[in-house]
Amino acid sequence: MIKSEVVLAVKRRKARLIVVNSRNIHLNKFSALNLRVKPGGEVALVNGMMSVILREGLADAEFLQSRAVGAEALKQALQSLSPEQAEARTGVGGETIAEAARLYAKAKRGVILISTGQNSDDQDPALARAAADLALLAGKIGKESCGVFVLGEKNNSQGALDMGVTPNLLPGYADGKDPGERARFEKAWGLPLPDQPGRGALAILQGIEEGRIKGLYLAGENPVVTYPDSAGRRKPSPPWTSWWLRTVSSPRPLPWPTWSFRPPPLPRRKGLLPTWTAGSNGSGRLCPRRGRPVPTSGSSRISAGRWGPLGAGIGPGGE
């Protein structure tokens, strides 16, 4: 969907597209500039563009003075970055980097789109911060048709961040390590919160292999295909693990790859509970469109009807 919007902007609105990727992707056919960066060199590329903007006086000084902080520190940090250094770190020619910087800084409107991959690479948070610095430097934040958008693979990826369904965040992007933020939520929820982050998806799977995690509920996930170390994901799960797999694309459970590596059913227990749940009282959000709520059918329940009793049964201590 987003790719189609980008192509339409180029074709119908004569937008100038800068593509940054280590591979030859479809959008290159529509780009004004194609920056084939070395894998892992994206942050250095953005820093190189900011260095050009500062060196050539293209920064939005009025915007920086009235709406940004830390501009001087950024200038100091980038002062020693030469075009030759940027080229060596990125594999992109220094003049091409400068051309991209001028094109972005001089445009009346500019949007930075960062595609999927933010949850699998250690440099991705740094890339998001660098992109935000670039947008601030050019004065392209808080204006119509401007900004930085980190695109998740699905609308649920964005929703998980909004709701704090991540190991280190609380709802509203509150930092779970911040004592003040924890105190605010502890007061609202009436429960103590741990001062250490939880486990991410890969750490959960590792915990299963090590016997520290006994149960797993997968909803629309396919770790064997989409997670790193696919070969490791293909190991059969230990027999003490109970799995619940929930499909989200068919009213009948599908034998998708992860299905094949579930543990065998335990005696007198269901080691596998395939479910189809058609009920949702929310709406999907995938910019710029919104989806309608999905009605329940049969004995299915909306999300709150499933997770509320489960959480109450587990209790705040996880026992």
Image (cartoon, rainbow, N blue to C red):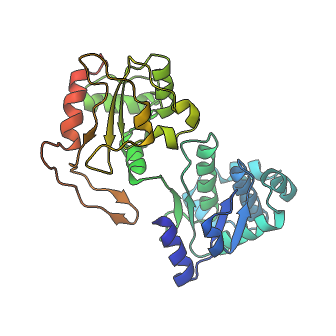
Q: Name the quarter where the C terminus is drawn.
A: top left
Total of numbered circles in the picture? Answer: 0
Q: Quadrant of residue 132?
A: bottom right
Q: Is residue 186 visible?
A: yes
Residue visible at 47% across and 38% down in the picture: 223
**On the picture, is 187 further left or further right than 139?**
left
Q: Quadrant of residue 24?
A: bottom right
Given residues 163 and 241, the one toward you in this image is 241
Q: Quadrant of residue 139?
A: bottom right
Given residues 65 and 312, the one toward you in this image is 312
Given residues 83 and 42, the one toward you in this image is 42
Q: Is residue 145 visible?
A: no
**On the picture, is 62 further left or further right than 83?**
left
Residue visible at 39% across and 39% down in the picture: 164
**On the picture, is 74 further left or further right than 9?**
right
Measuring from the top left, give residue 263's x and y in whole percent: 39, 25
Given residues 273 and 21, the one toward you in this image is 273
Residue visible at 35% across and 43% down in the picture: 163
Measuring from the top left, give residue 209's x and y in whole percent: 49, 21
Vertical relation: 25 (above or below) 308: below
**On the picture, is 268 further left or further right than 262?**
left
Residue furthest toward the right? 84
Residue visible at 70% across and 71% down in the picture: 33
